[in-house]
Image (tube, rainbow, N blue to C red):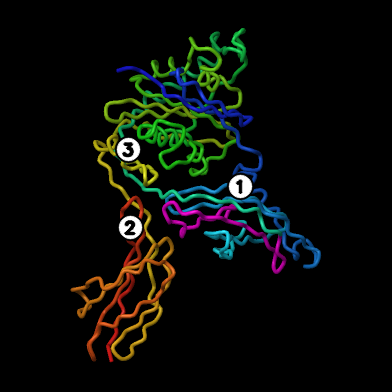
Amino acid sequence: MKKVFASAVILTAALGILFMPPEYNPTSQIVYATSDTSNTTDNSSNSADSSSAADTGATTEQIVVEQAKITKLQNTYKGVVVNFSEAKNATGYNIYRRRKTRDPWTLLASVSPKSKYKYTDTDAMKEGGIYTYMVQGYNGEVLGPESETMTIARVNITRAKVNIRYKQKSARNMQKLINDFRQGSDAWAWNVANTQKVYVTGLPKLAYDYSLEKIAMLRAAEVAIKFSHERPNGNPCFSALEEAGYEFKYAGENIAYGFKNEKDAFTAFQEINNKYEGQGHRRNMLSSDYNVCAIGHVKVNGVDYWVQEFAFTENDSDYTRTIESKTKVTIEIASDDISTYKSKLKKADVVYKDYAPSKVRILSKTVSKKKVTVNFSMSKGAYGYEVYRSENKKTGYQKIKTINNQSRLMFIDKNVEKKKIYYYYIVPFRVSHDTYIYGKKSDIIKAKAK
């Protein structure tokens, strides 16, 4: 089989972006640096700085709550995650949302700094829906300035449980190849002008990080479905580190496929015959920004996929056993892309699952002449509701009404007979990639017609 990489995008630590030319084949490298304010360690220490008037001895009139800032919106399986920064003197944060510019803001929640400055909007489930958010810090009755708004288009996410064959023995063997390369006489890369080989000396060996390996293994499974530094759910590859709670200052990723063993894959990553623009993988392996690495290796439909992950972290990891077997892996995929990947997944024994709307609670019933009126609570993430009725509490339910409006929380059944007993329940639903996704049915309510 032809051994190839795919074209890719490079993000340098300075956040410069370079698109590889189409004629360049061996690519797939990313280098990424987090800012000092975005890593988990800083966030947790910042939360300890928040103080109330009682702590500081200040009066309410003296407290000035500074402006919060939304740092990122992210589509996830459970909804839209709102990430925001700490606002000085704030003891809590109000999270607001609106769907249209003319709409008033809806208060979704009030959260404390213990939330780690993020909130998941589980109601943001309309496929292709446009959601705008605003955050406002507060301290008691003192409100800070409203943050600038941020908008996201909703992409629904489906979870696919995929049977993946891991080959981690060969993956772990690659660590020695990387370290020998870093400390050997061949540790060089071309300068930007391609006029001089720049040799790198004094590089330390990279420790193998078993926590990072779990992420590398997930990414290898994802790369087998979508060969890209963008994940199948549409998020950047480094979101996998953030979701795992992996604390890092710098991170990098190399990906490849078609190489059956670690030596061939490593040799391809070295890019020894390429010029500067084609040595992104090489520079990643020779970077002084990292102190750990981990590798993932999977085989899907007869093809080998490799992922190298690099990072700088201050956290130690504990040894885990080497996995050389088929394992069920949960991969998040943008729902509207599932049909694209089904050919790759058809031999992988896949089970799909979508996030369901929340359960409805029946709040009240009113029985009057020849009609029954039922009021119920709103379901988060629902598009609408189906109403079912039976004359027998245990069996025989039939759908009598479909409500295609999430906010319409009442139905009237006029097709009733005097003194008959009826039983009702309600099922919330939403529509994603032309599929109806149902939540749990409500508790059953009994009504006797007048």
Quick check: 102 above or below 191? Answer: below
Quick check: 159 above or below 236? Answer: below
Q: Identify which residue, 264 or 276, lies in the foreground.
A: 276
Q: Quick one: label 1 or label 2, which is nearer the N terminus?
A: 1
Image position of 85 (left or right of 207): right
User: Residue tagged by mark 1?
Assistant: 71
- For numbered disc 3, what is the local secondary structure? helix
User: Residue tagged by mark 3?
Assistant: 341
Gap between marks 2 and 3 measured at Cα:
20 Å
Quick check: 141 above or below 245? Answer: below
User: Residue tagged by mark 2?
Assistant: 437
Image position of 253 (left or right of 403): right
Amino acid type, residue under disc 3 in the picture:
Tyr
Asked if marks 1 and 2 touch (Cβ < 8 Å), the reply is no
Image position of 428 (left or right of 206): left
Percent of width and height locating residue 439: 34, 62
Which residue is painted at 75% across and 64% down in the image?
53
Which residue is painted at 46% across and 27% down in the image?
308
Q: Residues within 10 Å of mark 2 (few under 14, many from 20)?
A: some
Gap between marks 1 and 2 measured at Cα:
31 Å
Amino acid type, residue under disc 1 in the picture:
Thr
Which residue is painted at 56% across and 26% down in the image?
18
Q: Which residues are magenta?
A: 115-144
Gap between marks 3 and 1 measured at Cα:
31 Å
Q: Quick one: label 2 or label 3, which is nearer the N terminus?
A: 3
Amino acid type, residue under disc 2 in the picture:
Ile
Percent of width and height locating residue 24: 46, 18
Does the stretch in magenta take in 130? yes
Give the image quarter of residue 57: bottom right
Does the stretch in magenta take in 123? yes
